[in-house]
Image (cartoon, rainbow, N blue to C red):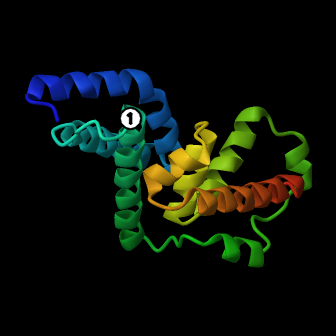
Amino acid sequence: MPSSRSQSDDLYASAIHAYGSALDRLARAYEFDPEDRRDLLQEIHLALWRSFDAFAAQCSLRTWVYRVAHNAATSHVMRCRRRKSKTLVSLEEIEEQGGIAANEDSYQSLEQSQILEKLYALIQRLNPLDRQVILLYLEGMDASTIGEITGISSGYVATKIHRIKAILREQFRHGGNHE
């Protein structure tokens, strides 16, 4: 456990240096609106900075950063969910609804940035746990690390990843559009 604010500040600086761009991607995946995204990123940074007073190095710095960031993002989403009428849906609901509406003409002309926007739009519709799992997976983490961060078994993580990837693949095959 850090013994002084200076050590906590140093840990925070190291974490931001190593994982700052991942935190930006995480905020983008959780929030589509640029202003809401900036607010979320600020909340994540504040939560992370505050968290280092309690960091006891019982897990890796990376695990700690992702755990704190995803917890802050999930809390943010739940607060916004209460304020807005926008509904999060489960994987089952997305499958039942047929996912995102198709528009094959526009799909053929999409550039990579548009594909990324579509991916973020679909990810934003997922419930917080599914969103957290797929975002950690997209950051290159394995099932056991994701399980450590989320508190669920690595087997369940692997199952969730498989299902989420299948849904994403299906949506892209049908030219899904988030509108």
Quarter of the image that includes the N terminus: top left
Mark 1 residue type = Ser
Q: Position of residue 136 (x, y in %)?
A: 55, 45
The residue depicted at 70 percent of the width and 35 percent of the height is 113
- Characterize the local packing of mark 1: few (<14), some (14-19) or many (20 or more) Cα atoms within 10 angstroms: few
Q: Position of residue 106 (x, y in %)?
A: 86, 48
The residue depicted at 77 percent of the width and 61 percent of the height is 167
Q: Position of residue 14 (x, y in %)?
A: 32, 22
- Whether residue 176 can be seen here: no
**In the rendered view, would you say 47 is above or below 18?**
below
Q: Is residue 28 left or right of residue 112?
A: left
> Mark 1 highlights which residue?
60
Task: Indicate the quadrant where residue 123 lies.
Answer: bottom right
Front-lying residue, 37 or 130? 130
Q: Position of residue 110 (x, y in %)?
A: 82, 39
**In the rendered view, would you say 41 is above or below 101?**
above
